[in-house]
Amino acid sequence: MRSSRNKGQSMPSENLIMAVAATAELCGRTFTPAAAAVFVDDLSGYPEPQVLGALRRCRREVRGILTVNDVVSRLDDGRPGADEAWAMIPQDESGSVVWSHEMALAFGVAQPLLAVGDRVAARMAFKEAYNCIVAMARDAGTPVKWTPSFGLDPGARDAAVMTAARAGRMTIEHAVELCPAIAHEAPSLVEGLQRIAGLLADTTKKVTA
């Protein structure tokens, strides 16, 4: 995990320090001031609103000693969780997906198992690889990157691109460039993205208030 503060990086807010201490206590163990300071410093490379959101999830989900990995694994940085990522993977060669770099790498691990028909083992292999790759990407501060992987069905391509555009994973211009047939959907896509942006802005205000 990161443990050194970047030059010029702002100090953690009192709100974050209090949130870490409270979360640790609610999860079952009180941190000493020194331990809390180290814990906060290990999270210093991540945007504070994301860390505060992850701490809220930890308070609901973690039982036992709170770890830095508990927090990092719950950061909302645009990457889906392992189960959601697996569910996005097409079931056959006709399907399409706009997926992250981490999803593509993890699917490469699972694909040989899918080829022999062992879907359960493939899912487990995908999740294990995906969680590991995502953790390394987050630790390195690598932003999520989305790319299309198109199958044989043109309709499935359009659906995958529209889903990605609505989720803010690609621009509307890029979506229409990839699939001109969805151009008539552009106004509704713009409206949906504006609504998402408004919700994100409201959430950020609440987190930082």
Image: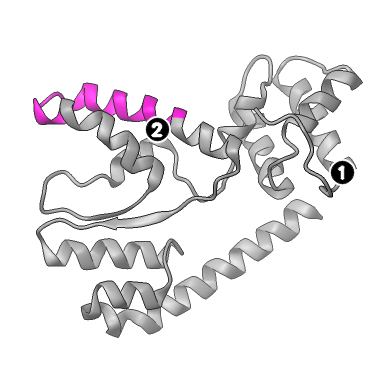
Q: Does 167 sit above or below residue 79?
A: below
Instruction: Please tell me whether the stretch drawn in magenta is mainly helix, strand or loop.
Output: helix
**So how many labels did they put on this image?**
2
Q: Does 145 sit above or below residue 196?
A: above
| 148 displayed left or right of 24 | left
Q: Residue 63: x, y in percent?
A: 62, 18
Q: Secondary structure at mark 1?
A: loop
Q: Which mark is residue 162?
A: none
Mark 1 or mark 2, which has the lower sequence index?
1
Residue under numbered circle 1: 11
How is the model colour-coded? one colour
Task: Name which residue type carries label 2.
Answer: Tyr
Q: Quadrant of residue 32?
A: top right
Q: Is residue 145 magenta?
A: no
Report crowding for label 2: few under 14, some 14 to 19, many 20 or more residues within 10 A (C-alpha). many
Q: Quadrant of residue 2?
A: top right
Q: Residue at x 16, y 53 (%)?
A: 95
Q: Residue at x 15, y 30 (%)?
A: 114
Magenta region, residue range = 114-132
Q: Residue 161: x, y in percent?
A: 30, 65
Q: Does 168 sit above or below residue 184?
A: above
Q: Residue at x 61, y 70 (%)?
A: 198
53 or 13: nearer the eye?
Answer: 13
Task: Name which residue type carries label 1.
Answer: Met
Q: Does 78 sit above or below residue 197?
A: above
- The quadrant of the rendering that contains the C terminus is bottom right
Q: Which mark is residue 130?
A: 2
Please, which residue is most extreme toward the front here? Answer: 7
Q: Residue at x 9, y 27 (%)?
A: 117
